[in-house]
Image (spheres, grey):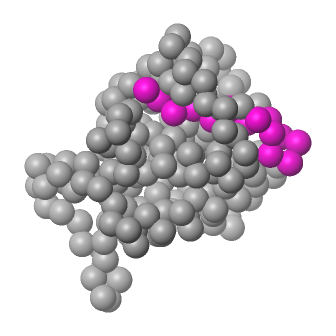
C-alpha cells in the first residue's frame, strides 16, 4: 500500500494558504479519484482516506498536527522501515516557482520544518518527496521570493489568489500521475520523466 502524506496546517484559517499546498493537492487528488470518505484517526493525529487507483491501494494522510509536528502523524503508519519505500510526502517549496515541482529522494529537509519533523520521527531520509513550487516569478521567469524570516512566514501563511488556486489544481493532476507512476514503475522512472 502506498502512503501519501500532504503536509499543511489543520483549521479553516489555513485552508488555502501556500503552506498548505501539500494538503490541498492531496485533497484534490482524493476528490478526483473518489476518495471522499475521510476518517479522523485520533491515534495517528490525522485524517485518512483509503482506496484504489488502477488496482493499487493508497492510504492518503492529512496530518491534523501543526506543520512543525507533522512527523507525529506519520510515525504511526511507518512502524517498519520497509514501509518507507512506499511513503511519498507532498509539500510546498518556496525555492521553486509556482506551478513547478521536483521529485526528490533521500535528501535533507532544505529547511522545511514539516519535512524535518517527518525525517526526525521516522529516523530516515529514505523516502520520496514531491516539492511543489509556491513562489511568484518576474516576467523573465526569475523567482521573487520574500526576504527575511518574518516576510517568508507571512508569505507562506498567506492565502493563494484565485489564479494561483487554478495553477495548484493543474499541478494536482501532474502529482496524481506521478504517484501512480511511482507505485507502478518506481521512483527512478518518475524522476527521469518529471524532474
Number of marks present in the image shown:
0
Q: Is residue 98 visible to the viewer in this orientation of the structure? A: no
> Which residues fall within the magenta stretch?
51-64
Where is residue 1? Give x, y as percent: 76, 31
Would you say the magenta stretch is mainly helix, strand or loop? Answer: strand
Q: Is residue 99 above or below residue 16?
A: below
Q: Residue at x 54, y 63 (%)?
A: 169
Q: Relative to 10, is 99 on the left or the right?
A: right
Q: Residue at x 33, y 66 (%)?
A: 161
Q: Is residue 141 above or below residue 22?
A: below
Q: Is residue 52 magenta?
A: yes
Q: Is residue 72 visible to the viewer in this orientation of the structure? A: yes
Q: Residue at x 70, y 24 (%)?
A: 82
Viewer-side residue, 22 vs 141: 22
Viewer-side residue, 70 vs 50: 50
Residue that extends furthest to the bottom in the rendered view of this protein: 140
Could you say which quadrant of the image residue 67 lies in? top left
Where is residue 137? Give x, y as percent: 31, 77
Where is residue 31? Give x, y as percent: 64, 48
Q: Quadrant of the C terminus?
A: bottom right
Q: Residue at x 80, y 39 (%)?
A: 52
Where is residue 182? Give x, y as percent: 73, 49
Q: Is residue 135 magenta?
A: no
Amino acid at each position: 500500500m502506498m502512503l501519501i502524506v500532504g503536509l499543511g496546517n489543520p483549521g479553516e484559517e489555513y485552508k488555502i494558504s501556500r503552506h498548505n499546498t501539500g494538503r490541498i493537492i492531496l485533497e484534490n487528488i482524493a476528490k478526483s479519484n473518489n476518495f471522499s470518505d475521510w476518517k479522523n484517526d485520533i491515534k495517528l493525529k490525522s485524517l485518512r482516506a483509503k482506496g484504489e487507483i488502477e488496482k493499487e491501494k493508497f492510504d492518503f494522510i492529512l496530518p491534523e498536527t501543526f506543520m512543525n509536528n507533522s512527523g507525529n502523524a506519520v510515525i504511526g503508519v511507518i512502524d517498519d522501515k520497509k514501509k518507507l519505500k512506499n511513503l511519498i510526502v507532498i509539500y510546498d517549496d518556496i525555492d521553486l516557482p509556482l506551478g513547478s515541482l521536483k521529485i526528490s529522494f533521500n535528501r535533507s529537509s532544505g529547511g522545511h520544518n514539516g519535512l524535518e519533523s517527518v525525517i526526525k520521527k521516522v529516523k530516515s531520509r529514505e523516502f520520496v518527496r514531491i516539492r511543489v513550487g509556491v513562489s511568484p516569478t518576474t516576467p523573465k521567469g526569475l523567482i521573487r521570493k520574500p526576504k527575511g524570516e518574518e516576510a517568508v512566514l507571512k508569505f507562506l501563511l498567506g492565502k493563494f489568489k484565485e489564479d494561483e488556486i487554478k495553477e495548484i489544481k493543474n499541478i494536482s493532476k501532474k502529482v496524481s500521475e506521478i504517484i501512480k507512476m511511482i507505485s507502478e514503475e518506481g521512483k527512478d522512472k518518475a524522476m527521469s520523466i518529471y524532474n
